[in-house]
Amino acid sequence: MTFPNLIIAGAPKCGSTSLFNYLVDHPEVCGSDIKETGYLFDKEYPLFKNVKDGRNWYKGGVSGYGDFFPKYNKSVHKVVVEATPDYMYQLAIFDKLAQIPVKPDIVFILRDPAMRAYSLYKYAKNNIGTAENINTFTEFVDLVSSQDKLLNDRGILKNAINHGIYINFIRRWIDELGRHKVHVYLFESMKGFPLEFMKGVAKDIGVRDEWYDGYKFSVENESFAVNSRAIHSRAKSIYRNFGGYVPFKGAAKKAYKYFNTSKLTAITQEETELVNRLREFYLPHNLELASQLSVDISLWR
């Protein structure tokens, strides 16, 4: 039975998909057969119902978690990894981790929380459609700030601002697992200096860092503008019907993006001003994060 010795546990909309892909491309790293297993979700968490094939801890227990790593080869792989960024917010996860024979290191990749909120809005409005009836970022922030009942059945959006107070959540992980088991990286560093970033991560987790010399870094899971909402809804329905496994998925995804998506428009002046106001709100929390975890947040200012 194989279990991960590395879990990317946060944060959503901070580049976890790209980081996971960069890692699993490394020959000494074995990734889970699906990136976000969601296996350790709390029953009450909004995304629990979306877990593929209903595979979860409450049904499969410890052994079911090991089923996500069929490609593991003891003679080749030094690191076994999965990435479910919403693990960051789970409450019952530590009891589950305590029952796993391997005690994994935990990675959090974080970004400017104000821009994370903006990215989440754009992603929810365009890619997944859960905010398609919220017309502007200003309206979105107002709804979240007032905890409007419109968001009652959209828990991820309802917590969009609170989930950016990273220190409140990471502190629990440190208290439970110890500071030495928790590693914090910044999305902005990965985006701006991907080679240096990944070589640093490789050294931290004990795989050959020189392998990334010449590696082609691509960006995954970006937000986009949808040209036809009807076509987008139909595509999502087909994806769900196939359980997330669409025949010729890579080609189908490229064709869909070519015909029905376009780049998002640049951030507006109004949106920029609101992002800056959110930065003021987050500043004391960010400073606490920087102080307690020795994280350089200068790229967030």
Image (cartoon, grey):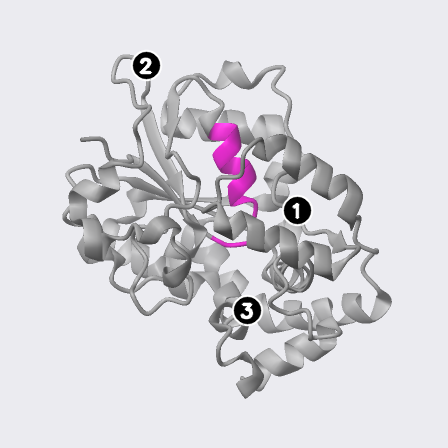
For this view, does 115 lie left or right of residue 245?
right
Instruction: Give the CA separation, mark 3 to mark 1.
Output: 18 Å
Where disc 1 sits, the SS reads loop
- The disc, 3 or 1, on the residue closer to the chain's N-terminal end is 3
Measured as percent of width and height from the top left, residue 99 is found at 14, 48
Looking at the rendered image, the quarter that the N terminus falls into is top left
Q: Which residue is mark 2?
A: 76
Q: Residues within 10 Å of mark 1 (few under 14, many from 20)?
A: some
- Disc 1 residue type? Glu
Is mark 3 in CB contact (under 8 Å) with mark 2? no
The mark found on residue 160 in the picture is 3
For this view, does 83 lie left or right of residue 160?
left
- Disc 2 residue type? Val
Instruction: Give the CA separation, mark 1 to mark 2.
Output: 32 Å
- Disc 3 residue type? Ala
Q: Residue at x 64, y 22 (%)?
A: 216
The mark found on residue 35 in the picture is none
Is mark 3 in CB contact (under 8 Å) with mark 1? no
Residue 295 vertical placement versus 272 (above, below): above
Q: Which residues are magenta?
A: 11-23
Measured as percent of width and height from the top left, residue 163 is found at 49, 66
Question: Residue 137, can we see it?
Answer: yes
Q: Residues within 10 Å of mark 3 (few under 14, many from 20)?
A: many
Q: Which residue is mark 1?
A: 222
Which is nearer the eye, 8 or 57? Answer: 57
Q: Residue at x 42, y 39 (%)?
A: 34
Q: Residue at x 32, y 58 (%)?
A: 41
For this view, does 150 lie left or right of residue 34?
right
Measured as percent of width and height from the top left, residue 13 is found at 57, 53
Question: Residue 127, can we see it?
Answer: no
